[in-house]
Every structure is written in structure tokens, then in C-alpha cells.
Image (tube, rainbow, N blue to C red):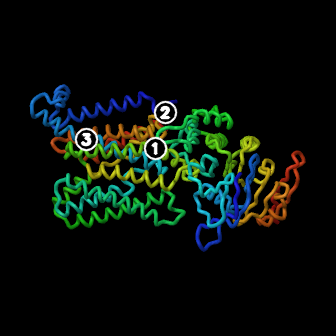
Amino acid sequence: MIAFERVTVRYRAREAPAVDGASFTCANGEITALVGPNGSGKSTLVRALLGREPLAAGRILMDGTERASLEQLEFARRVAVVPQREETVFPLLVREYVALGRYPYSRGLTGSPGDAAAVERAVARAEVDALLDRRTDELSGGEWQRVRIARALAQEAGMLVLDEPTTFLDIAHEMALLELVHSLAAGGMAVLMVSHQLNLVARFAARMVLLSRGKVMADGPPSKVMDAGTLEAVYDWPIVISRDAASGAPVLLPLRKR
Amino acid sequence: MIEARSWHWIAALALLLLAAVAGLVFGVTNIPVGDTLRALAGDGDDTTVTIIRTLRGPRVALAALVGAALAMSGAALQGVLRNSLAEPYLLGVSGGAAVGAVLAFGMGMQHSGSLAIPAFAGAIAAVAAALLVARAAGRSARGDPRTLLMAGVIIGAFANAVIMVALANSTADTLRGSLWWMMGSVADASWFGALWLAVYVGLAGMALLRLAPEIDVLALGEDAAAALGSNVERATRRIFLVSALLAGATVAAAGLVGFVGLIVPHIVRAFGARRHRPLIGGSALVGGTLVILADVVARTALPPAELPLGAVTALIGVPFFLYQLGRTR
């Protein structure tokens, strides 16, 4: 479980905080979706969790342990984060790339004994077996995202954080990825997923947290957070919410301006 | 596809040895291979033994060490800066070392052996200045490797200005000496200097090989590196420091030998090294080979004149680099 308690992050002393007293939890066994407009503080929260931005106030707890008390390697053994951006200037083979997920366990010049087996499990789980000998700069968008998740799974952490994992993916790859993430959560992981695709996450997440200007505006099951009034106020755009006839999931439709 | 196949390693080692033999055999007077090997063991006429053991031997050793150090430094910096155009001299190392050497020249130090210390001091001062400039940048820019590259370029430009001012006011002898030094040379090699550099490059090289997995992770980007447990700022600082120490030592020992740090990692990557441990190790072997051969060309192309080593490395390196570029595309 990941718990954010009154977390505040400031980029500059005098400006409004990027994250302003945000509190919510991400429970084991389900997907928690972190949504909100551009600049609402979603990625800043991920960076704060990574230790890349210091907290001005509040704390982040991971299974009860305070984030700030953990060494970076220890953090990486507990939480696997797939950041929004990653570079492939110097491409690796997929098998080498996934093996980097074992970095948190490396000691000195050698790896740890469980490395090969952990990589094999991660590869099987993310179904990227067929890609092992491909280069990371030759993968399609969908393949690359799955390979990145395989790398995260090789970390064998109990918690998984994904920052906009479905950007640039077509419908089939997007759905396949979400099905994979959902099954990982169903297997017991705590999954925190940052996303712009409200309709999509409303079908997979047990819980949605809506951020606006660094504050939590709504927090609960999709049926509660997908509220036309709240979303209109946060996104500053006319919105209607209907219910999908087939799945029963709430569906958001932004209206044309007249 | 196996990374860095074992025959690649054997071939690289064999090439290095062949280059070393060539470095001993060829010169103003070419000595047959058999005589060269006998002279190495101390047999043969005194002149040959002297040429091989006290002139060409240390020269080959120094060239190999300079090449190895520059290539390892370049491989590490390209990875950590995530930029395939990065090279050791971009950090301001070359400019700083040149300032140190030119100032020492100006103050009357003439023997190039005594330039090592001021040159090294200048190189380290320049890198420290670049790190400080990058650190003074805003918090959001500090972690950005481009900030450090910019800082290095700026410090380098400033160093160039200092050199111009120093040289504008100097005698023709000082000018020629300084320019010659800046073009790179291993002509003044001694066993003492080579041994000293060997220990230094050996230790720093091992440090880089140890840091290599950190470079693999940092090459993915800073957020990804942090996600995998890297202490990004600390790791980056360490890698910069070791790379700068390596490059600084080569500048002190042999002046500016351009292009080696830029192109050798690309050559080694083209042979399938992707992770930084084989990349840095392979770069050491290939870099050593390249500079030994460049030195052979430098002293045999237009006898009795010697060409500047730095010019030869660029003349050999650039076409080879372009060929590799064409092959990998």
C-alpha cells in the first residue's frame, strides 16, 4: 500500500505549490488511477515518490514505512516505477533491458542469484518472450510499454506505479496493456496509474483520485469521481456523463462549445 | 545475438598487440620484427636495443594508455550524458589543461615533462568550475545533463580566451612550443611517466568498470534511473569525476589528442557492445590500438618531420567513424 499524507511539493519558494496537501491511498490488489488536467500535479507526485522532488510538507508511506527513511535501492526493491519518459539513445536488447530491473539487487561486481529466474518470470508475465532479441529502439509503442512493464516486474516489488502508460497506443494495445495491469493488481500488487484517459481507467480502476491545481478534488470509486459537475469544474469544459450500456461503466463526453 | 562475443575480445587484444609491435618496428628507421623482439629481450646491437627499449617502448606504452583513458572516459560520458556526441574534452578538460600548460610555458617551463602538473591542475580546475557552474543553475536544471555540457563548453571558451591573451604576449618559441603541445604528442615518453600513468589509468579504469552498471541505468534517463534505485546526482558526479580525472591525466601526459574519446565508443558499439562494462573495456583496447597506430603514422608519414598526434587521430578517426556510421545504418 502507498499512502500519501498531506503531501506538499513546491518548485519555487514563492509560487503556489505544485502539490498542495494531497492525501490518498493506493491499496493492494487494485488499480488506483490518478487523473486530472495538465499541470494538476500528477507527475510531480510520481517524482516526489521517486525522491526526485523533496516534500515541503507531509509524508509518503509505503506499507507503513516512510519513503524519506529509505535508501534509493531499498525503495526500488519495494516500488517499481515506470516513468513517463525514458530514453533509448543507446539501445539495449530487450533481454538486457529487462535485466536492468534487477539493478536494485546488484551487489558490487556481480548480480544476485535470483536474477535469471526473476527476469524469466517478468518476461512471461508481461508476455514479451518473442521480443527478447529485439533492440529497444526497434519496438512499436505497444511493445515498448510492455517491455518497460516487464522491466518493472523484474524488480519484484509489491507496488507498481505507471505514469501515463497508454500514451500513443492504439485501442488494442491500450486495452491489452490495461488488462495486463489489471491482472497484476488482481494478483495482489498495489498499482498507481497516472492517466489522462478517464473513460479507460474508469473501467479498470477500483478507485480514482482527481487532482486539480495540486489538490485532491475527488477520491473514490469511478462511479463517484466521474461526476459531470466536479469534472466540469476541474477541467473547465462542459461535460456530460452517461453510462455505457454494455459494461455499465461511466462514460465521459466533452461537449462542443457553441 | 550475444553481446560482445568472445572472438571480438580476442581480436581486439590481438590488434592491440599487433599495433604495439608495429609501434616498435616502424619509425625513422624501420627495424625488422625479429630484431625488434630480440631487442625487447635485450639482445642485439646497442643502438637497436636503445631505440626499442628506451625510445619506442615507452612511446608505445604511453600512446596505448592515452588512447585507453580517453576512450573509456568518452564511453562513460556519452552514457551518463545520454549524448552520442559527448566526449571528454567537452567538459572543459582540454581548455583547462591548455591554460595550465600555456601559463607554465609563459613562466619559463620549457621541458614538456614538467608541464604535466600544471596541465593536470588546469584540467581539474576547469572540470570543477564546470561542475560549479552547473550546480549554480536552478534546481530543475541541475539534474539536466545538458546544463553540464553547456557549462563545460562555456568554461572551454573562456579557457580559449585566456590562452589567446597569454599567447598574444609571448615569444615565437613559447608560441610554437605551446601550439605543438596543444596538438598532442607522445614523443617525450619515458618509462617512468608511462608507469605512473599506467597505475593511474588502471585504478581509474577499474573505478569506471565498477560504475558501469550505474551508467547503464543512468543512460535510460534520470527518472528511470531513480526508479531503479540509482542515487542520480551522486552517481552522475562520481562518473564525471572519474572521467575527468582520466581525460585530465592524458592531457597532462600527451597534450590534446582529439577524436579518440568521441569515436572509439561508437566503434565498439558497432561491434555489439551495448552495456557499459563491455563498452568501457572494449573502448580501452580499441582506444589504445588507435592511438598507437596514429603515433606510428605521425612519425613515419612525412619523415623526418613528425606530424601532430592529435591531427593524425582525427585524420584516421573521422573516415573510420563515417565508414562505421554507414555500416550501422
Q: Quadrant of the C terminus of chain A?
A: bottom right
Amino acid type at image mark 3: Asp
**Left or right of A5 in this view: B296:** left
Which structural element holds mark 1? helix
Q: Which residue is mark 1?
A: B212
- The residue at the point 67 percent across, 47 percent down is A160
Of residue A47 and residue B313, the one placed in the foreground of this image is: A47
Q: Identify the residue under disc 2.
A: B3
Q: Is residue A162 visible?
A: yes
Residue in the image at 42% along x and 38% along y: B268
State how many labels appear: 3
State how far apart marks 1 and 3 are (Cα): 29 Å
Q: Residue furthest right?
A: A245
Of mark 1 and mark 3, the one earlier in the sequence is 1
Query: Crowdedness of circle 1 by 10 Å Cα count: few (<14), some, many (20+)?
Result: many
Which amino acid type corresponds to the residue marked 2 in the rendered image?
Glu
Q: Residue at x 24, y 39 (%)?
A: B60
Height in image: B275 above or below B178?
above
- Residue furthest to the top: B34
Given the image, on which type of amino acid does mark 1 rest? Ala
Q: Which residue is mark 3?
A: B295
Residue B48 sits in quarter:
top left
Residue A28, position as x, y percentages in the image: 74, 48
Q: Real-space Cα distance between discs 3 and 2?
A: 31 Å
Q: Residues within 10 Å of mark 2 (few under 14, many from 20)?
A: some
Chain of the residue that carries numbered disc 1 in the rendered image: B
